[in-house]
Image (cartoon, rainbow, N blue to C red):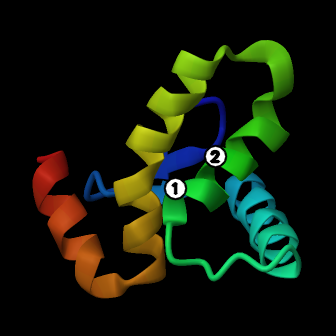
Amino acid sequence: MDGIVRFEPDGRPRTTRKWQSAMARAAFHLYGSGDDGSDLRLAIAHAAVEIYGDRKCDEELADIVEAMLPIEAAELDPRVRDVVKIAAR
């Protein structure tokens, strides 16, 4: 996915520095706006819009959010990472 996901030797998807940087900026912006961080999809959407801008339509951005949600959840919580690894097989 355009340099935002890489795969470990065992096939597990991991986010790249490019994606992690966009997520950090999204979290900073959203937290500063009073968001409580309870919906990870909002930060993912914010990061996706930052990276892709108007090069992706709303439907494509929604697909990116859907695809990135389990990967990003696994990045944030190692217990989820095992579930993503199993699903990737």
The residue under label 2 is 45
Nearest to the observer: residue 16 or residue 31: 31
Residue type for callout 1: Arg
From the viewer's perspective, is residue 31 above or below residue 8? below
Q: Position of residue 62 (x, y in %)?
A: 51, 31
The residue under label 1 is 41
Occupied quadrant, residue 10? bottom left
Residue type for callout 2: Ala
Give the residue at x 85% y 66%: 25
Q: Is residue 77 left or right of residue 33?
A: left
Q: Can the viewer see residue 24 in this picture?
A: yes
Which dot marks residue 52? none
**Which quarter shows the N terminus?**
top right
Give the residue at x 46% y 73%: 75
Residue density around tag 1, few if under 14, some if 14–19, many if 20 or more, within 10 Å: some
Give the residue at x 60% y 56%: 42
Q: Is residue 30 left or right of residue 6?
A: right
Residue density around tag 2, few if under 14, some if 14–19, many if 20 or more, within 10 Å: many
Q: Secondary structure at mark 2?
A: helix
Q: Is residue 84 left or right of residue 1?
A: left
Occupied quadrant, residue 58? top right
Mark 2 vs mark 1, CA separation in Å: 6 Å
Q: Is residue 25 left or right of residue 4?
A: right
For the residues bearing labels 2 and 1, Cβ distance under 8 angstroms = yes
Q: Secondary structure at mark 1?
A: helix
Nearest to the observer: residue 7 or residue 70: 70
Q: Position of residue 43 (x, y in %)?
A: 65, 60
Q: Can the viewer see residue 13 in this picture?
A: no
Q: Position of residue 21 (x, y in %)?
A: 80, 63
